[in-house]
Amino acid sequence: MVTRARDATDRRVVRAKITEAGLRLLDSLDDSIDQTVQQILAHVPKQRLRTLSKLLEAARAGLSG
């Protein structure tokens, strides 16, 4: 599912990479995860979901730059 390899220039660093099998597994879980999230958030009012979405977008933007 994941491969690990030491960095060629800095042996303290371990690089992890998801394998094709790992990607297929994650892809197979997408629908199940979506259904679970929908069930969890079903009781939350739409306005609160919009607020949550905006907060998550801001957090993601902060991570990317």
Image: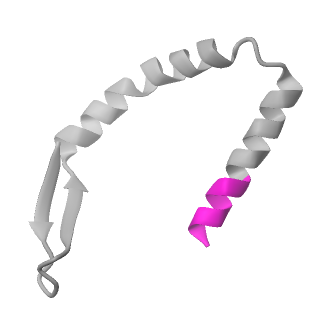
Residue drawn at (58%, 64%) of the image: 63
Q: How many marks?
A: 0
Give the percent coordinates (x, y) of residue 9: 15, 88
Judged left or right of residue 61, residue 8 is: left
Compared with 55, 16 (above or below) is below
Residue 36 covered by magenta stretch: no
Judged left or right of residue 12, residue 61 is: right
Give the percent coordinates (x, y) of residue 37: 57, 21
Give the percent coordinates (x, y) of residue 53: 74, 40
**Which quadrant would the C terminus be assigned to in this image?**
bottom right
Kindly give the residue lying farthest to the right in the view shown: 47
Place residue 40 in its image quadrant: top right
Q: Nearer the viewer, residue 32 or 13?
A: 13
Residue drawn at (78%, 46%) of the image: 54
Q: Which residues are magenta?
A: 58-65
Residue drawn at (70%, 51%) of the image: 57
Judged left or right of residue 48, residue 59 is: left
Place residue 41 in its image quadrant: top right
**Which quadrant would the N terminus be assigned to in this image?**
top left
